[in-house]
Amino acid sequence: MQASNTLWRFRGVTPTAMLAFVYLYLPIVVLVVLSFNANRIATLWTGFSFDWYLKVMDNDNILRATKNSLIIASGATVLATSFATMAALAMAGKRFRGQAFINAMLGLPLLVPEIVTAVASLLFFLALGLDLGLLTVLIAHTVFCIPFAYLPIRARLEGLDPRLAEAAADLYAGPFATFRRVTLPLILPGVLSGAMLAFIVSLDDFVITFFVAGAGATTLPVYIFGLIRMGITPEVNAVSALMLLVSIAFVALSYWMGQRKS
């Protein structure tokens, strides 16, 4: 804490930090404000209106893309969280040869550029002869979301007292009963935090979805990209503002759940 306070005393650090925050967040604020613009020209403010939000709610294409996004995000969240929980349980409290390699492989999707993951996923599905659609998007999102779900669960398990499981075994509880009655309730905040993080990552993903989605599998980010290519309107701003609101809500919930005690 003292070193952090000393850093802020260097000349130019505070203005640079403020400029960085302005650069990051001012465009988002402008987007949200312009989503209430009554004029069809997005950059020309003529008055306040909710019309574009109402048009978004009545747009069948947007609703269909939103439905696809929710289906894929929900499925990927359940699968990724399940795999991440099993992986975290298998890696917790054990030391074995190759453990560092497995940890690196679990975190690899976080380091590999997303465009590389997207191209590799596309080539993999084509090699298997799978038709591009909701299934291929679901598989790709599940694999991509596993590290995001794994990290909060693993962090929760590392803070778990191993003597609790040993005590349950001494009371004749089997492995499944120990997991259901002892381990799972204690790591549940981490599991929920990882699930929420995986959900929002899947919901917001564009690059991977753009490569592996086929006809009828258009998600909301891909649909927004198509709208932007035809010109930015307040309708695009309204959809983006709604996605921003959902993202902030889920990230905040994920952080809150991760900080909660079981």
Image (cartoon, rainbow, N blue to C red):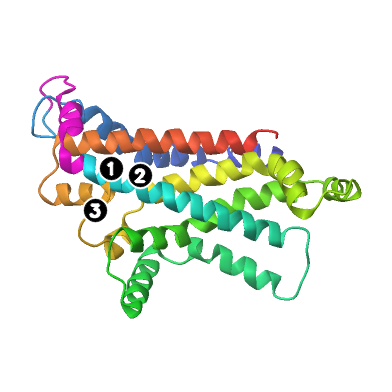
Q: Circle 3 sits on which residue?
A: 218
Mark 3 in CB contact with mark 2 (< 8 angstroms): no
Q: Which residue is mark 1?
A: 66
Question: Viewed as shown, does residue 99 lie left or right of 130?
Answer: right
- From the viewer's perspective, is 123 left or right of 78? left
Q: Going 27% across and 31% down the picture, which residue do you hit?
A: 32
Magenta-colored span: 45-62
Which amino acid, mark 2?
Leu
Q: Magenta stretch containing residue 16, yes or no?
A: no
**Disc 3 residue type (three-letter):** Thr
Is residue 219 something one can see in this rendering? yes
Q: Position of residue 179 (x, y in %)?
A: 73, 49
Name the one closer to the observer, 124 or 8.
124
Report helix, strand or loop for mark 3.
loop
Q: Earlier in the sequence, mark 3 or mark 2?
A: 2
**Secondary structure beneath disc 2?**
helix
Nearest to N terminus: mark 3 or mark 1: 1
**Residue 204 appears in the rendering:** no
Instruction: Determine crowd level at label 1: few under 14, some 14-19, many 20+ residues with C-alpha closer than 10 A.
Output: some
Name the residue at 70% across, 62% down: 91
Give percent across and percent down for residue 212: 30, 64
Number of marks drawn: 3
The answer to which quarter of the image holds residue 231 is: top left
Residue type at mark 1 is Thr
Q: Secondary structure at mark 1?
A: helix
Residue name at image x 91 percent, y 49 percent: 170
> Quick check: 186 above or below 50?
below
Q: Looking at the image, is 75 positioned above or below residue 25?
A: below
Q: Which residue is mark 2?
A: 70
Q: Of all residues shown, which one is farthest toward the right? A: 170
Task: State yes or no: discs 1 and 2 in contact (Cβ < 8 Å).
Answer: yes
